[in-house]
Image (cartoon, rainbow, N blue to C red):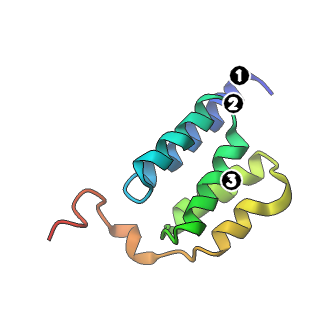
Amino acid sequence: MDAAHYEELAGRLYGVLISLDDRIGSEQARLLHHFIDVGEYGLALEEIAGTLAQDAIAITGQERGDMLALAARMNLDGGLVPRALAARPPTAGLEHRCPRTADAG
């Protein structure tokens, strides 16, 4: 695999984290960013999925699809990501939610 492949994986993982920014705590987000920074892409994705499952964090269908596509692209063994995401059914209400204003009110 070439450098461009790993840069794409990192970019897609950062994109997933950005989309979950309003739902994952800042400490956990820093740890996940660190995993990506040091090239532990599989660990980062597994930890993202595990955090979502453990903390019962709602995700959109798009977020689920992005993470499953990344898991397939990285050929992650064991199926941890799909199993963790199966515990998080898609939440249609999040599709139209504005993260910065959803709690105002």
Residue at numbered disc 3: 46
Q: Is residue 76 left or right of residue 51?
A: right
The quarter of the picture where the C terminus appears is bottom left
| Secondary structure of residue under mark 3 | helix
The quarter holding residue 84 reads bottom right
Disc 1 residue crowd, few under 14, some 14–19, many 20+, Cα 10 Å: few
Q: Amino acid at mark 3?
A: Glu
- Indicate which disc, 3 or 2, sits on the residue closer to the N terminus: 2
In the image, residue 85 sits, relative to residue 99, either above or below, namely: below
- Local secondary structure at mark 2: helix
Cβ–Cβ below 8 Å for labels 3 and 2?
no
Image coordinates for residue 50, horizontal then vertical, percent: 63, 60
Q: Residue furthest right?
A: 77
Query: How far apart are the alpha carbons under marks 2 and 1?
Result: 5 Å
Q: Quadrant of the N terminus?
A: top right
Task: Kindly report the distance in space between the C-alpha atoms of the residues bearing marks 3 and 2.
Answer: 17 Å
Q: Are marks 2 and 1 in contact (CB under 8 Å)?
A: yes
Q: Identify the residue shown where x is 55% and y is 64%.
A: 52
Q: Residue at x 25, y 66 (%)?
A: 102
Residue under label 1, please give it: 3
What amino acid does circle 2 point to?
Answer: Tyr
In the image, which is nearer the foreground, mark 1 or mark 3? Answer: 3
User: Dot 3, how many residues are within 10 Å of its Cα: few (below 14), some (14-19), or many (20+)?
Assistant: many
Percent across and percent down for residue 31 are 54, 41
Query: With respect to residue 46, does 53 lie above or below?
Result: below
